[in-house]
Image (cartoon, coloured by chain):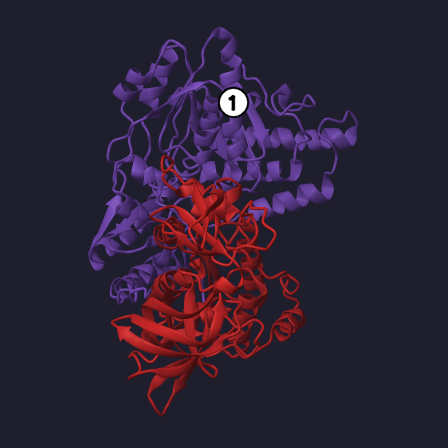
Chain colours: A purple, B red
Amino acid sequence: MTWMRIYLDYNATAPPLPEVVAAVSRVMSTTFGNASSVHAFGQQAKAELDAARAGVAHLIGAEASEVVFTAGGTESDNLAVRGAAEALEPAGRRHLIATAIEHEAVLNTVRALERRGWAATLLPLDATGVVSPDALRAALRPDTALVSIMHANNEIGTIQPIEALAPIARAAGALFHTDAVQSAGKIPVNVRHLGVDLLSLSAHKFGGPKGTGALWIRRGVRLVPYMTGGRQERGRRAGTENVPTLAGMGVAARIAADRLHHAGAIAVLRDRLEAGILARVPGTVANGDPARRVPNTSNISFEAIEAESLLIALDLEGVAISTGSACSSGSLEPSHVLRAMGLPNARARNSLRFSLGSTTTLEEVDFVVGVLPRLVDRLRHLGRPAAAVR
Amino acid sequence: MRVVVAMSGGVDSSVAAAQLVDAGHEVIGLSMQLYDQRQGAESFGSCCSLDDLHDARRVASALGIPHYIVNFEEQFQATVVRNFVDEYARGRTPIPCVHCNATLKFAHLVERAAGLDAAAVATGHYANVRFDEDCRQYRLLRGADASKDQSYFLFSLTQDQLSRAMFPVGHMTKPEVRAYAERLHLAVADKPDSHEICFVPDGQTGDFVERHLDQDAALDGEIVDSSGALVGRHRGLHRFTVGQRKGLGLSKPEPLYVLRLEPAERRLVVGSKQELGGRELSASGVNWIAGLPPDGPRRVTARIRHRHADAPATVMSSASERASLVFDDPQLAITPGQAVVFYDQDDVVGGGWID
């Protein structure tokens, strides 16, 4: 393709920052030692890990010693949910709480524990995708082990009032986990202000490498590790650390922290895109909370459109967007997030997610607003399929 | 021209896509997801299974064309699978592939293609479509490879559907298709042909139908011979088709065949091979490729199942979408639910469902 492609799918993944590419390459070519080794090679690797850990801690206002490196957001979520569930089981706590709009990494982990005898409650949401403190109060039980509520949602960008929710759970003696994969790097994330016990991060959502993440574990919180083996990560996550990509994560985290003020400019572009689409394409409506959401995300339903087709039509024009979480085969299904918000199946099936980032330009936004009316019009004015003959 | 090609992950549709690329078209590969790939073994069929979707993606990538998976699970369940089970429940032997072609590939997929500004949908069928300048009509013809011809499965296509259909491998033989795939180093060049019904990958049609039937309904019944004498019992009519010899559980000196299924009485009628022959049939849901039925009786050759060598017959349109047909010579196992397709040399004249 000789023409420009426009990438508006930052919530799926962000392009790695040049500084990250340089750091991964540098560490991979100069520092091959095993960070657990006693000798100089090991110490050199350990120093890289320490620097990376400090960078990640800096992004979320934590102590470096509380950061456990993992192979990504999904593993962080698994470690948090499984680790807390198992750690509190001997105390008779066999109940888990999450929301219906959690990422599958949390939802399916909760479901897996349910099949093994844990009880679970999925909290309801209002029409903008927000959980109320009252809903959490009502769901808490004396035997609740863990409450897991995502910070920002990947599909609609809605930010949950974690500061209000976490104290409620902790007062009931339950641990509180938040999946901050979609908020870190987009809005300020501070573990002390949020008041949580556990917080998941994924490097590639803020310009770091894929397959690399972290779980912040408040000092004093005990988890049962589910990856067993060596004593890496203070015995909380076994396996030789992937030093090059973790170094990249550290660099990405520092840059993300420095550039949080860019969010305003991204929000301006997002608002221009959203307003442009709502004004120029009839039968469109924005989903989620227009105020309480991350600055880069817009989720829009297109009436009488199969989102699948519009996504393909946009891709053929060089515009990359998403309809929400992709499933195993890459085929598209009605969003579980929008259905949990009470939207009808049709609207959950005809919604598209636009997620912007640091490379997004005004010209790109205007191109998308310009091309959409024609594509939508074509998809809406199809002759009905010829009746099947039989 | 922008063309959508329905890519199953098999060698035929892969080469169809490659041919269109070679011809200079702007090709978009679409693969249909027809059932939930994440559920149980039942989902992992021979066509459109997760592996096949990956194969399709690899081929598209090798050809440098965009490829997408479209979700037709609901439509597939509501039309093809539902009809398949209903037909067995009515004592008939269905062919789901015809419905899949008519309602998914050449209806829903054509609609998707139009939404993407594509003029046509191409498939890997061994058949040919040609516009006849003289009568200003599309003709549907047999594929060049007589042993692979799939025109039988396409009899229900209308002129409108034919106008948007392309069969790029229809002029090729199977060995030519495989050689073409090998020349392009396509990973699917040696992939075996699929034979069974895609959503019943283990071939246990009876078990599949049973799982989808009303669980409380009694299924078993009597087996009688053509004189009405009781000769045994069966576990369910959906486990039998006309002409079937195996699985009857009868020990008789001469081989017995299923002659017909009588669903109202849940009765299976068996008899000798001589009794299996028949010359006449009537068909419903008849489609005439030209759009209109012929005036009066028409001499044709007719096929009563995919692997049947067509035999001379006379067909007559009896009413709207109905036809009656008389073979010159008796044919074995005329089976309700199967398609009868009428040919004039290589032209498909029309076809319908045997009643």
Q: Residue at x 44, y 59 (%)?
A: B95
Is residue A9 something one can see in this rendering? yes
Q: Which residue appears at 42% of the width and 20% of the height? A: A196
Foreground pick, A319 / A94: A94
Front-most of residues B161 and B7: B161
Q: Is residue A126 above or below residue A325?
A: above
- When asked about the image quadrant of residue A168, the answer is top left
Chain of the residue under label 1 = A
Horizontal and vertical percent position of residue A42: 75, 30
> Percent from the top left, x then y, of residue A100?
35, 31
Q: Considering depth in this image, is A367 or A336 the residue closer to the camera? A: A336
Q: Position of residue A351 (x, y in %)?
A: 31, 49
Give the amino acid type for the residue marked by disc 1 in the picture.
Arg
Secondary structure category for the residue under label 1: helix
Q: Quadrant of residue B220?
A: top left
Q: Is residue A357 visible?
A: no
Quarter of the image holding residue A192? Answer: top left
- Up-down: is B326 above or below B244? below
Q: Which residue is mark 1?
A: A82
